[in-house]
Image (cartoon, rainbow, N blue to C red):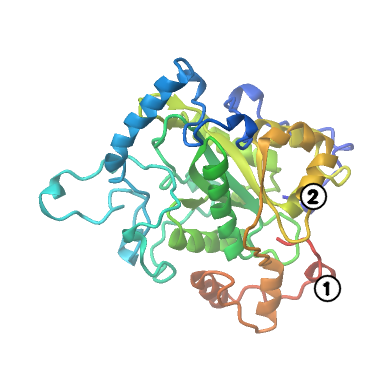
Amino acid sequence: MDPTHDPNFKPPSLNKDMEPPAPSYKIPANVPIQPYVLADLGEALDDPSPHPQFSSGSRSQRRQSASASEHTDEQTAKYHTKIPRIHTEFMSNSTAAASPPPAGPAASAGPDPSVIFPATVDVKPYQIADLEEVPHGLERQAANLKDYRFPTHRLATTLSDDTKYPLVIVACGSFSPITYLHLRMFEMALDAITEQTRFEVIGGFYSPVSSNYKKQGLAPAHHRVRMCELACERTSSWLMVDAWESLQPRYTRTALVLDHFNEEINIKRGGIMTKSGDRRGVKIMLLAGGDLIESMGEPDVWADQDLHHILGKYGCLIVERTGSDVRSFLLSHDIMYEHRRNVLVIKQLIYNDISSTKIRLFIRRGMSVQYLLPNSVIRYIQQHKLYCDSEPVKQVMSERTD
């Protein structure tokens, strides 16, 4: 998020007491996010380079191993990530009720409830439901740091393909309110990673900023966290909301937020389990719009150490927006160009420029916001009478969305 919205913001050149990010030895050394290149021609795209620990052996041997893994597809199909269908399924984070109970003799040989496989772009029959209705009983994030628990109810516990590298996507933002574009950004990122890279997405997180973020139109943090919960818990089978950043007593730099996810996923939980029984470090990447990336080029706004940390140690997934030329910006920005192999630009094939700023304007004018954000979020806004206060015209007309 834009550091200038910190009430205590100091230009990095004048801030000598800036908290340093996590040291390199605490962050798993992962390969870049670079997509397939011409060097891959002649090789099957579904036969990616293996993880370094599997790098021994010939390509033909690895292909034989890959073909053998196809026989496990039937077993893998038994597992799925949980998506609720009725309000009684919201009472617990447990994955035990993730799939409908099988009928007949197979009922005694159900899937292991402790295993969650990564996200998939396929829509399963058990996911067909009125996903935006009956948002009762959602397991909520804590309202204070004392009761905080890192959400893992949809975080994959086992890689489905040992030849790929595990990846978690994190989106930081105000989400005031969350819109269908915020949800679509994750799906676009999932498509791009699945089709263009050697990574496997094992989870996605929204991390709303705290109430100390100095920005007009920012609803209190607990409201924004709740709206994100309603949106992704009812419409997605792999997205989660983490309230840690929103519970902080002051603005938290993006570099430190990514360090928090690394601490929870890689240090405390040891990464992810592979099918072979080994544990593997998870790559964590920031998901952002082109407008946020352009703010990184403004002088004395982002500290150079933070940019090197975010782009070099973690990486960035950038969703292009109408009118933004992200590739030219990457070429002109020295630090971004240095870490270009760790940046993946995602082109919108169907342009969607829904803006939270314009949503708030529509609400103040009494206009319809139907089909711009989930119904459960619209009802929450109406119930709590959010976004009734006016905002500066300059902010409403700004080309930079949120």
Query: Which residue has dot 2 on it?
Result: 294
Q: Is residue 84 visible?
A: yes
Say whether residue 112 is left or right of residue 260: left
Residue at 49% in and 25% down: 50
Q: Position of residue 65 (x, y in %)?
A: 37, 25
Observer-nearest residue: 21 or 287? 287
Say whether residue 299 is left or right of residue 280: right
Q: Is residue 296 visible?
A: no
Q: Position of residue 258 (x, y in %)?
A: 62, 39
Q: Secondary structure at mark 2?
A: helix
**Crowding near the residue tagged with mark 1, few <14, some 14–19, many ≥20 C-alpha atoms within 10 Å:** few
Residue 393 tag number: 1
Observer-nearest residue: 60 or 125? 60
Q: Secondary structure at mark 1?
A: helix
Q: Is residue 101 above or below residue 44?
A: below
Residue at 58% in and 37% down: 284
Q: Is residue 312 above or below residue 103?
A: above
Residue type (three-letter) at the residue carrying disc 1: Val
Q: Where the C terminus falls, by quadrant? A: bottom right
Whether label 1 touches label 2, CB < 8 Å: no
Q: Position of residue 332 (x, y in %)?
A: 85, 41
Residue at 42% in and 47% down: 154
Residue type (three-letter) at the residue carrying disc 2: Glu
Picture quarter containing residue 285? Answer: top right
Q: Position of residue 168 (x, y in %)?
A: 53, 41
Picture quarter containing residue 100? Answer: bottom left
Q: Is residue 384 above or below residue 175?
A: below
Q: Residue furthest bottom?
A: 366
